[in-house]
Image: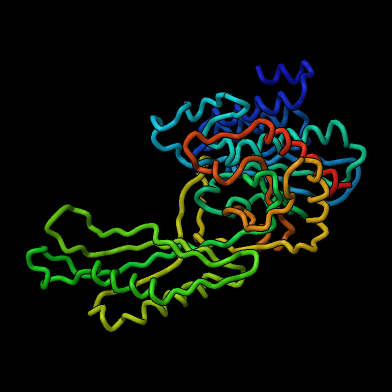
Amino acid sequence: MWGETLMKGKERETDLIQLCQELIRRPSLSGKERDIAHYIADVMRFIGYDEVSIDSLGNVVGRIAFHAPGKRLLFESQMDHVDPGTLADWSFYPYGAFIKDGCIYGRGASDQKGCLAAMVMAGAELKDKFYNTLKGELVVAGTVFQERFEGIASRSVASAFPPDYVVLGEATDLKVKRGQRGRAEIVIETQGRMAHSSNPELGSNPADAMISILSSIYQFFTPSFKPFFGENILVLTTLHTYPDLGTGLVPEICRAIFDLRISPDESPESVIEKFGIFIDQVKDSLHGIKVKFFVSETEERTYTGAPIRGKHFARAWVLSPESEYLEKVLNAVKTLDVESRLSDSPGLGTNGCYYAGELEIPTVAFGPSGEGQVHSIDEYIEINDLLRAFRGYEGIAREVLA
């Protein structure tokens, strides 16, 4: 058993590899994280965390208090992952955690079970070796539903354990990310009148109206450019008519969904205002078609049964390059043998949209593997990167809580 290897005193790095494998072997789609959450909680208790809890949403949180009062540092990674897709496309069973050529293969290996395993084990290492030299607290959290709701589950963590500093586990190639673009999911719906397609004049086709609206958006949308963030990106991700009953039907509703990547000066209101301008350009040609547009909002239930609801709007955020916290983080990872310690580009979507974007808490993202592995077929994490991330997290805590 994995626990027996710890009791026998084997190297903690060996335990880390095995922990990463055990996390991968526990499927944890959004809303189905119960098994992995309880397993992580058991591991935290076994390796000496002072306090371990699972909150009402299902987040698992472990706390270690060092010898003197001080700041609270939060390490956070998600527990959920995206669907592995068609299993036949994988070279290995996606929940097998097979090791080949120095890599652990499996869904979530890079996003973010490797990060979470390294964070959990770093906490144990810090308590064992540096309890008397550090001040404050380390909190390690595994959160639910990050793939569906950026930042929503983190509200519960921050409410119970308000952090002074945050490290997010992300696939950053062991570089430090100091910000991310924001994201807004915009829904546009046109509503017409159903008719048989042999007599289209008896109905009003919302798809025709949507074509006009999409043409206006593509004509008038001008990406804004912000240093560090680059250009805003607008992508049409969904286009569908309802009801979908086959042939011979003028539909009643047409729905389009856009993914808009945004900079820090954008709000839900400013985004909706822009889309309103695009639609106004063609309103005279819509011929009575009803149009509504909004930032999408979803409610689901976590594995505990608790409702989780939120708008699909994540604020952009950036940490100043002059930040004292950033300086400490960079100093901590300088021994990891990476080409450049600080990334010059924004990261992927993270719960930093809440910690940094809303609460303005100093936040960075750091972890093993790269963005190319995220959500990929045959996802893997290099064991050497996993071990270096473990040392990186340990070093960050030693710098920040000194």
* Residue 246 in view: yes
Q: How many marks?
A: 0
Q: Residue furthest bottom?
A: 284
Colouring scheme applied when the structure was drawn? rainbow
Q: Name the residue nearer the viewer: 202 or 398.
A: 398
Image height check: is 40 above or below 4? below
The image quarter containing residue 389 is: top right
The image quarter containing residue 387 is: top right
Q: Residue furthest front?
A: 339
Image height check: is 181 above or below 384? below
The image quarter containing residue 135 is: top right
Left or right: 217 as drawn, with respect to 46: left
Left or right: 21 as drawn, with respect to 85: right
* Residue 159 in view: no
Find residue 276 and report its horizontal and vertical position in percent: 41, 77
Find residue 345 and report its horizontal and vertical position in percent: 64, 58
Image height check: is 333 above or below 28? below
Image height check: is 317 above or below 7? below
Query: Where, quadrant-wise, is the N terminus in this rendering?
Result: top right
Residue lying at 65% horizontally and 63% vertically, measured from the top left: 317
Q: Name the residue nearer the viewer: 193 or 122.
A: 122
Residue lying at 88% horizontally and 36% vertically, measured from the top left: 130
Find residue 125 and report its horizontal and vertical position in percent: 80, 32
Left or right: 4 as drawn, with respect to 24: right
Find residue 47 and report its horizontal and vertical position in percent: 75, 28
